[in-house]
Image (spheres, helix red, strand yellow):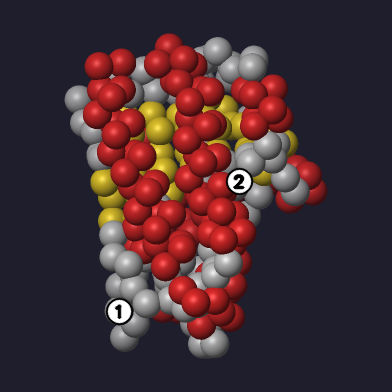
Amino acid sequence: MTDRPLALITGASRGIGAAIAHALAPTHRLLLGGRDVAALDAVAAGLPDARPWLVELTDGAALAAATADLTRLDVLVHSAGVVRVGPLSGFTADQWRWMYEVNVVAVAELTRLLLPALRAARGQVVLINSGAGQNANPSWGPYAASKFALRAFADVLRAEEEGAGLRVTSVYPGRTDTDMQRVVRADEGGEYEPERYLTADSVAAAVRASVLATPDAHLTDVTIRSRPVR
């Protein structure tokens, strides 16, 4: 199966990243990015052609070493991310930096390092953004700011790399049933109601649709919201 296209998915140990791995497994070889060895091994064990890709995304030297042997890459999915919510007055400079380092800077650096491999394949970059990257609401300041920055990064990358044949897709899910959403609801002091949220598989299906779009099509921005509970 070595002739199948290759996809690298960050944040693949759980949640949306793991769901994307399962969605792309029938058509792609997979590199599963993350730090949790046991969790990545468990995801890889259930897939036909997947292996862990262990790296700390905020470690520039480690990132450069991990990408050095990748000379051709068909799909890069940025699914790793962090979130905390609360009033602006409660966030320190270090917390702002932490959110930007993971949600923006690591994305920009990994993309930069892999651009030659993506250009060689006329590949695709998929960025898992958020509804917070479209509308900034109270208590979502640092996270929304990082996601607005991610949106700008995607728009500029798309414009700059169009001539190289790259497709760049931003995906904006609403609230999704994941461990990250549990952190958010704990910060908000609210109940966790999974029946009101999207499933990770639903987000992954949208990613798969963008990746498998016909060569003449380019899904640039995909917004997904849950349907009302009846």
Mark 1 surroundings: few (<14), some (14-19) or many (≥20) residues within 10 A: few
**Residue 81 vertical position relative to residue 162 in the rendered view, above or below:** below
Residue at the spot 36% in from the left edge and 18% down from the top edge: 122
Could you tell me if the residues under marks 2 and 1 are in contact, i.e. CB atoms within 8 Å?
A: no
Horizontal placement of 7 versus 230: left or right?
right
Mark carried by residue 12: 2
- What residue is shown with label 1? 228
CA gap, disc 2 and disc 1: 28 Å
Quadrant of the image for the C terminus? Answer: bottom left
Of the image marks 2 and 1, the number of the one nearer the N terminus = 2
Q: Position of residue 1 (x, y in %)?
A: 58, 19
Q: Nearer the viewer, residue 26 or 207?
A: 207
Q: Amino acid at mark 1?
A: Pro
Q: Amino acid at mark 2?
A: Ala
Residue at the spot 63% in from the left edge and 40% down from the top edge: 57
Residue at the spot 71% in from the left edge and 30% down from the top edge: 62
